[in-house]
Amino acid sequence: METDIKDYDLQAEELIEKHGVNDHFHEEHHGDKYQSGFFSKYIFSLDHKMIAKQFLVTGIFWAIIGAGMSVIFRLQLGYPDADLHWLKPLLGKWINLDSAGAGSLSPDFYLALVTMHGTILIFFVLTAGLSGTFANLLLPLQLGARDMASPIMNMMSSWFFMLASVVMFFSLFLSTGPFSGGWVAYPPLSVLPQASTGSGAGMTLWLAALILFVISNVLGGVNYITTILNMRTKGMTMWRMPLTVWSILVTAIVGLLAFPVLFAGFLLLIFDRSLGTSFYLSEIFIGGQALDHVGGSPILYQHLFWFLGHPEVYIVILPAMGIVSEILAVNARKPIFGYRAMVYSLLTIGFLSFLVWAHHMFMSGINPFLASIFSAFSMIIAVPSSVKVFNWLSTIFRGNIRFNSASLFAIGFVSMFISGGLTGLFMGNAVLDIQIHDTYFIVAHFHLVMGVAAIFGMLAGVYHWYPKFYARHMNETLGQIHFWGTIISAYMVFWPMHYLGMFGVPRRYYSFDAFDSFKDFTGINKFITIGAIIGFLVQFLFIVNFFYSIWRGRKMTSKNPYKATTLEWTTPIHTPHGNWPGNVPVVERWAYDYSKNGEDYVPQVLPLREGEEAH
């Protein structure tokens, strides 16, 4: 069998040279001359692989900051009477010292930490860090393209993301503190600079960073869609594309339709803040004095925000779904179960994501009949999600599974998605939502189904495609320790939160000391905090593994180490600018011919044998 496998890789290489498409790329571009210097290679690079690394490393940076913030505010919740003076050198004036020298976290800064944690993880890590990384890396490689449709637009998308990151990072060091009105930025806290310490300059920089982020996302989305529709190699029909490509296509379409609405909402918010308009304000009193704002409605902002906010859930999770589908098929050595059903479920989820936004607003006073409509669609969207879960489980059922770091995180994704998704059925019911709205039940649900699940998908992708980034492998032992530490700590943190929510414990509270009824949950809060600290520390195994392996990891000895079928594994170990040194491959079959006719795998570039039926 080993001889046959080696022959397949050799056959693929020979077929690309003999029958591939000669697009004269290297004659026109002369190899890597555009990447000869440091700045041209790392700063002004037009190569999609380098841009993917830029998104990934920036996303890792933000993940560390966002996770660190969660540990700090969990210390406050788990141990509200603890002495935190040791954080004074890091947090400065945001640690209040009493007469005895004991330190406590400032209530204002607690709210700022919660706000920035949500903003950073949702937008800068799970949107740009996930989609930006794997869309840039995989689209040209899996479609058989030399690069993205517009390398310059791709570079601009990366630059705008970096600029947004710089602005958001600077906001953390303002003397008045970063924005503290919640990651959803509801008016009036986000509109009135005098509403809180973080509503002044902190909110201004928050808005500027998010507007730059939206521009980055739109530039990337246009590029991704154009690349998928126009840059596929010969033979790569839509029904031969890997599910990673399908998931990125749907994600880009959803983002392109939803983010401009958020952009418009932000513009109106800026008008209210700076030009004296009243789109979101009406009859506001501060210190007993009426403000000169009449006729606006904060509910308008909620509609505009959640029209992006709920599709954003799928902008985050859909790329992870595609990554997990690919990794499970490769490591189970089985074709993905129900390929077309998986594609149609992706398209259905993308469509329905625009019809459920008001289930975030059941407690805002919307018409009960309207609430029932959105509740129905919220239940319906569970159907295509269930199809995907069923197909993932069927793919690994009785498969010859290779339990490596990537496959473990992919299986962990399925576990998190099931656990978090089932609790969504409660929240989608307009009646049950009355009890659990704005409680820790909500926190537990969206962290499991969107936050942790998407992180698991992202980590699975990093472990799996790391050889395509750096031509080396990450340490497998550290990777598996990282997995078990992460999944155990994640369930330690978010499973108990469901019980807190069912008892009505509200989220975003700095302290529960004033409520006798909530003091019974002190033990659970301590347990959750311990889990959060363990989970945070375990991530440093990944950080060390990631950066150490760039220079000291096990080198690739085969350009197809996983014996996979897709086109990215036909490129050289050190993939050059343009991806293939000669011709571009021609695709002859679909992406999941595993364990077929006695063969372990059949690459996409191998022609169908006589009598063999195409999938």
Image: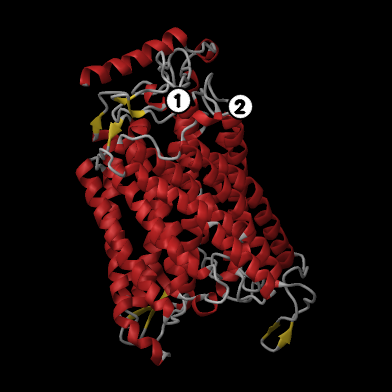
- Residue at label 2? 230
Residue at the (64%, 52%) spot, across then down? 258
Residue 67 versus residue 215 in the image, above or below: below
**Where residue 42 sits in the image (x, y, percent)?**
45, 33
- What mark, if any, has residue 37 been given in the picture? 1
The residues tagged by marks 1 and 2 sit, at their Cα atoms, a distance apart of 31 Å
Residue 189 percent location from the top left of the image: 62, 73
Is disc 2 placed on a helix, strand or loop?
helix
Q: In the image, is 11 to the left or to the right of 386?
A: left
Q: Secondary structure at mark 1?
A: loop
Q: Can you give x and y, in whole percent of width and height, for residue 261 in the image?
A: 68, 54
Q: Amino acid at mark 2?
A: Asn
Q: Quadrant of the N terminus?
A: top left
Q: Are marks 1 and 2 in contact (CB under 8 Å)?
A: no
Q: Quadrant of residue 3?
A: top left
Residue nearest the observer in this picture, 399 or 142 = 399
Q: Nearer the viewer, residue 200 or 117?
A: 117
Q: Dot 2 surroundings within 10 Å: few (below 14), some, or many (20 or more)?
A: few
Residue 163, compared with residue 528, is above or below; it is above
Name the residue rendered at 52%, 46% in the picture: 345
Residue at the bottom extreme of this rendering: 516
In the figure, 342 relative to 441: above or below?
above
Q: Is residue 62 left or right of residue 150?
A: left
Q: Give the amino acid at mark 1.
A: Gly
Residue 203 visible in rendering = yes
